[in-house]
Image (cartoon, rainbow, N blue to C red):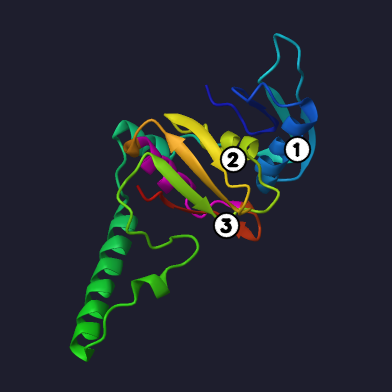
């Protein structure tokens, strides 16, 4: 049965220990990127806690298939032909560049070429992710809501001495890897894109 796009979406499994106002603030922060939010209905009664209804000003289209992150987790992910050819072209270009740099006698400056959305990291896969590029107002509850959609999520640790960075822990490095690829470059605000790497052991 096909359900047409609606103006209201239902969200469950929300963190229950937040106050109603803090929960609404987090929901606005996370969902406002998908359209103008008219209202958020979140109640703290026994039967309705951990749930919310988000009302948008326009109808919201939703996914009809698995996301890449879910497909990677269950092993059914396959690159499309366009993605494969794009990946092959990028690899070929990188190889040519490396060959030219070697011929010129200069060492490749990979660290300088890194962008905020895909930071260079020599860290081996790890169950703990290092997240940077966060707005100063970000708190652990907001990040927790973002990362808890991925299987194996354990906790978020903010670094109070340095606003804008955090550590996110998962059960194992495979699960953290899925979250890393799923949220790499995710814009919390229009000017703040998250940069995620594996934490150094």
Of 44 and 159, which appears nearest the observer?
Answer: 159
Of 138 and 60, which appears nearest the observer?
Answer: 138
Is disc 3 placed on a helix, strand or loop?
loop
Task: From the image, tell me which residue sits under label 1.
Answer: 25
What residue is shown at x 66% (from left), y 58% (from top)?
190
Q: Is residue 178 magenta?
A: yes
Magenta residues span: 175-187
Measuring from the top left, give residue 193's x and y in whole percent: 57, 57
Of 57 and 171, which appears nearest the observer?
Answer: 171
Measuring from the top left, give residue 6's x and y in whole percent: 68, 32
Q: CA distance from mark 2 to mark 1?
A: 13 Å
Q: CA distance from mark 1 to mark 3?
A: 20 Å
Disc number for residue 9? none
What residue is shown at x 38% (from left), y 63% (from top)?
120
Q: Is residue 22 left or right of residue 173?
A: right
Is disc 2 placed on a helix, strand or loop?
helix
Measuring from the top left, give residue 97's x and y in whole percent: 27, 79
Residue at the outermost bottom position: 104
Task: From the image, tell me which residue sits under label 2.
Answer: 143
Q: CA distance from mark 2 to mark 3?
A: 12 Å
Q: Quadrant of residue 145?
A: top right
Q: Is residue 79 left or right of residue 114?
A: left
Disc number for residue 133? 3
Measuring from the top left, give residue 89's x and y in whole percent: 28, 68
């Amino acid at each position: 049965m096909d359900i047409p796009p609606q103006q209201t979406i239902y969200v469950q499994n929300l963190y229950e220990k937040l106050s109603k106002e803090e929960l609404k603030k987090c929901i606005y922060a996370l969902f406002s990127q998908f359209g103008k939010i008219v209202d958020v209905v979140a109640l703290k009664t026994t039967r309705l806690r951990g749930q919310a209804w988000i009302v948008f000003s326009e109808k919201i289209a939703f996914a009809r298939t698995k996301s890449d992150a879910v497909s990677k987790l269950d092993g059914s992910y396959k690159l499309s032909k366009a993605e494969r050819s794009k990946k092959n072209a990028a690899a070929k270009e990188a190889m040519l560049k490396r060959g030219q740099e070697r011929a010129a006698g200069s060492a490749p400056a990979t660290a300088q070429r890194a962008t905020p959305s895909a930071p260079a990291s020599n860290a081996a896969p790890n169950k703990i992710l290092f997240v940077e590029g966060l707005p100063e107002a970000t708190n652990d509850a907001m990040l927790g809501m973002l990362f808890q959609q991925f299987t194996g999520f354990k906790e978020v640790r903010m670094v109070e001495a340095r606003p804008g960075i955090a550590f996110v822990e998962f059960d194992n490095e495979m699960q953290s890897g899925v979250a890393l690829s799923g949220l790499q470059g995710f814009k919390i605000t229009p000017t703040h894109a998250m940069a995620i790497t594996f934490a150094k052991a």
